Image: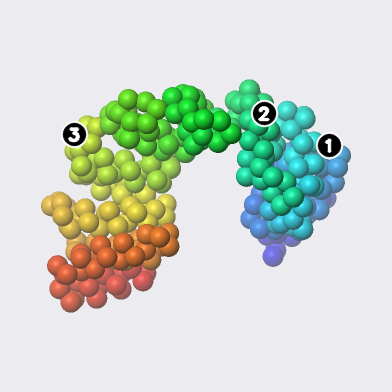
């Protein structure tokens, strides 16, 4: 509470704090969940015409965090910022149009219009979203080749999710010629950006020698890094790797702990198959190793 009070004092009373800095601090407070207090700074700035504040106020109305949900007001505030060439607002309007809201049916054509405006400003998430529309055939027949080209642009602009999507395309040969080496390189770009799913997939490729020579040590490190970022699939794969691949990482109890953690934190549709894998892994362990693994998993 004292820290929040200090932030609010800085936001509202420090004469040397610029409006831009005040809004940035309010945005940070809003992101940390202090919605009502942050909006005391954000809303006046939005009404005064600041586009960043308008995006935040639109977000509050769109999500119900700090305001009652109102798609109409969310669209109004996003539009005010978008007309000032704020790419984040343009992307937000595109997503509203793409997904639809209560009382506002989905409008893929409007989504494309806003995405193109955001793309013209180099917004990487706009390229990613437009690519997904093309890949999934939303609003028009699917065009995987065009979608892949936009993913490449999004990746060059620094969007890590584009690395994952592009790697999947190369791995499956959809819209581009199948090329496991390029898939491995794309996942590698995502891993360098700290994207957990890309790390997990790259680890699989290093383990199995897909798209290049196998590298068990690199696979082990990547699995661990992905687990540290909360990737449940990486934990289960790491457990199996530690059990099946000889090396300095051999530790049956720890492997079982990773498997238990992964199955516990997986998406609901994956929990049962992961539990089955963990059960198979446990069959090769001693009672002491299973007990130790369960103890370690409880501490993760």
What is the crowding at mark 2: few (fewer than 14 residues within 10 Å), some, or many (at least 20)?
Answer: some
Residue 49 is tagged as: 1
Residue at the image point whose x is 67% and y is 28% from the top? 113
Note whether 121 is above or below 257 in the view shown. Answer: above
In the picture provided, is 295 more to the left or to the right than 248?
right
Tell me the CA gap for discs 2 and 1.
23 Å
Name the residue that disc number 2 marks: 113
| Number of marks present in the image shown | 3
Secondary element under disc 2, as helix, strand or loop, is helix
Secondary element under disc 3, as helix, strand or loop, is loop
For the residues bearing labels 3 and 2, Cβ distance under 8 angstroms: no
Does the rendering let one see residue 91?
Answer: no
Residue at the image point whose x is 29% and y is 28% from the top? 179
Does the rendering let one see residue 177?
Answer: yes
Secondary element under disc 1, as helix, strand or loop, is loop
Residue at the image point whose x is 66% and y is 58% from the top? 33
What is the crowding at mark 3: few (fewer than 14 residues within 10 Å), some, or many (at least 20)?
Answer: few
Residue 65 appears at what percent x and percent y?
Answer: 70, 57
What colour scheme was applied to this rendering of the protein?
rainbow
Q: Nearer the viewer, residue 218 or 129?
A: 129
What is the quadrant of residue 18 in the picture?
A: top right
Mark 2 or mark 1: which comes first in sequence?
A: 1
Residue 206 is tagged as: none
Q: Nearer the viewer, residue 151 or 135?
A: 135
Residue 299 appears at what percent x and percent y?
Answer: 37, 69
Mark 3 or mark 2: which comes first in sequence?
A: 2
Tell me the CA gap for discs 3 and 2.
44 Å
Name the residue that disc number 3 marks: 213
Residue 49 appears at what percent x and percent y?
Answer: 83, 36
What is the crowding at mark 1: few (fewer than 14 residues within 10 Å), some, or many (at least 20)?
Answer: some
């Amino acid at each position: 509470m004292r820290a929040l009070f200090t932030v609010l004092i800085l936001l509202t009373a420090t004469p040397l704090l610029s409006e831009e800095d005040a809004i940035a601090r309010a945005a940070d407070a809003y992101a940390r969940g202090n919605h009502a207090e942050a909006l005391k700074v954000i809303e006046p700035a939005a009404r005064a015409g600041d586009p960043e504040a308008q995006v935040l106020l639109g977000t509050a109305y769109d999500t119900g965090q700090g305001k009652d949900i109102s798609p109409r007001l969310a669209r109004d505030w996003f539009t005010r910022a978008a007309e000032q060439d704020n790419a984040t607002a343009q992307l937000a309007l595109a997503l509203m149009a793409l997904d639809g809201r209560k009382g506002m049916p989905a409008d893929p054509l409007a989504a494309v219009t806003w995405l193109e405006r955001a793309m013209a400003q180099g917004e990487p998430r706009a390229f990613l979203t437009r690519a997904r529309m093309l890949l999934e055939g939303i609003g028009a027949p699917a065009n995987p080749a065009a979608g892949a080209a936009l993913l490449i642009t999004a990746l060059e602009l620094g969007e890590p999710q584009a690395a994952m999507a592009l790697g999947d395309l190369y791995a499956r040969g959809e819209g581009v010629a199948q090329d496991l080496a390029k898939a491995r390189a794309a996942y590698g770009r995502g891993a360098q950006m700290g994207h957990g799913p890309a790390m997990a997939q790259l680890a699989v490729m290093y383990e199995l020698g897909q798209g290049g020579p196998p590298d068990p040590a690199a696979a082990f490190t990547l699995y661990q890094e992905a687990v540290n970022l909360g990737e449940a699939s990486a934990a289960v794969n790491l457990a199996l790797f530690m059990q099946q691949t000889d090396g300095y990482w051999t530790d049956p109890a720890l492997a079982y702990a990773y498997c238990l953690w992964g199955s516990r934190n997986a998406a609901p549709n994956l929990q049962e198959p992961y539990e089955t894998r963990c059960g198979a892994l446990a069959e090769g362990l001693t009672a002491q190793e299973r007990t130790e693994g369960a103890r370690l998993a409880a501490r993760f």
